[in-house]
Amino acid sequence: MSTSSTARSIIATVLGLAVAASASCAPPAPRTARGDPIERSDLVLGTVCTLRLLDGGSEAALDAAFARLREIEDRMSANKAGTTVAAVNAAAGSGPVKVPADVLFVLGKALYYWTLSGGAFDPTIGPVVKLWNIGMDGERIPSVSELQAALPLVGAGSVRIDGAASTVYLPRAGMLLDLGAIAKGYAADEVGRILLERGVKAAVIDLGGNIMVLGKKADGTPWRVGVQDPSDDRGSYIGIAELPGGTTVVTSGIYERYFVGEDGVHYHHILDPATGYPVRNGLVSVTVIAESSIDADGLSTTLFALGLERGMALAESLPGVEAIFIDAENRVYASEGAGSIFRLSDGAYTMATLP
Ligand code: AMP
Ligand code: MG
């Protein structure tokens, strides 16, 4: 029997929201100036999504934002029947499928991170993800022969995109797209865009711990966003980042979806496209701070897959991107710019530097 983390993480996510809100939001603003905050939570994109409007906006703005979240889920989920991604997957080896522009955009970004990571990030990891089923019914350790059969189907280099026709073609039967490492970030960007268009001046977008802060707090101080403690339930933080509006904080971690096998080993959901096994490089999480959430999401998975040295070097090479790596020895490594915006709380973790 394996022990699933799914139930635990969903409950923890809900509990975490209250803490996330108190960590990241202003104290109640004077009603006359800003009105009461409006908040709504719903289960979308496989996680609890909470939108908290602190200045401007309306129930109609929330309706529009949640409608867009559901539309993104209906197009980009690999785990749901009837989505655009499911149609592309079903047509693998037989023909191209016409897709909406947003699917093409997200896939294009995923392919960019595939290139940037030298293949460590791969949106065609689907056949391997499906074998493990981590966080879903039927999660299990695949046999070596199953993995050997699935691995040749992984390889984003063979995905064929026709931009003019807006089609995607997976050339071999059995190939499966999985945009799970990047779609939530795109969704956060889209919610941000919609809220701003609808007159929202300050808000916290929380898509299952993928955070974006918009606008200015009532008291003019920076937003305070917690960096998740990987060894604790959601809502416990190792430290706080102080950030301007228009910033997103996205974490990839081994605690997010995992199970413990009969062998006592912790199997998590970030998989190595070269071996088919969960990435084991001594990291427990990587947090990315940036302006664009699709990039932060793509990068959090990319940096995790690359490991501390190569991941940090990549983060440092990208303007406007900061990263915080946590390893299994409770050491915390921050990129140069993150050093000035992130402060570690008292606790089990210590700041460390790369040699
Ligand atoms: P994230 O939580 O953003 O790091 O994304 C993890 C999810 O991305 C997993 O649950 C899989 O659906 C998918 N995934 C796993 N390994 C990889 C990989 N090496 N490259 C791209 N996507 C991956
Ligand atoms: Mg990601």
Image (spheres, rainbow, N blue to C red):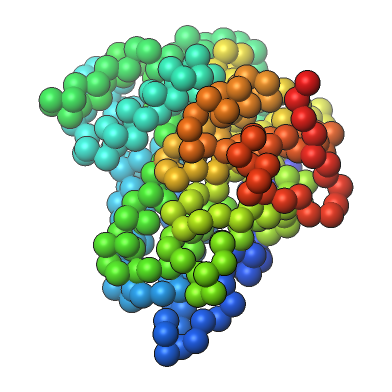
Q: Looking at the image, which residue sits at the far bottom?
A: 32
Seen at 61% across and 56% down, the residue is 242
In the rendered structure, the answer to whether residue 56 lies left or right of residue 252 reads: left
In the rendered picture of this protein, how many numbered marks are placed on residues?
0
Seen at 86% across and 47% down, the residue is 348
Residue 135 can be seen, yes or no: no
Locate residue 325: give its quadrant: top right
Q: Position of residue 129 (x, y in %)?
A: 53, 28
In the rendered structure, the answer to whether residue 40 lies left or right of residue 4 reads: left
Does residue 133 lie above or below 255 as drawn? Answer: above
Seen at 19% across and 21% down, the residue is 162
Q: Looking at the image, which residue sits at the far right?
A: 348
Who is closer to the viewer here, 8 or 72?
Answer: 72
Q: Which corner quadrant holds the N terminus?
A: top right
Residue 144 can be seen, yes or no: yes
Q: Position of residue 185 (x, y in %)?
A: 44, 44
Seen at 49% across and 29% down, the residue is 318
Locate residue 355: give its quadrant: top right
Locate residue 243: give its quadrant: bottom right
Q: Looking at the image, which residue sits at the far left?
A: 164
Who is closer to the viewer here, 56 or 59?
Answer: 56
Who is closer to the viewer here, 75 or 305?
Answer: 305
Q: Position of residue 219 (x, y in %)?
A: 54, 74
Does residue 202 lie above or below 141 as drawn? Answer: below
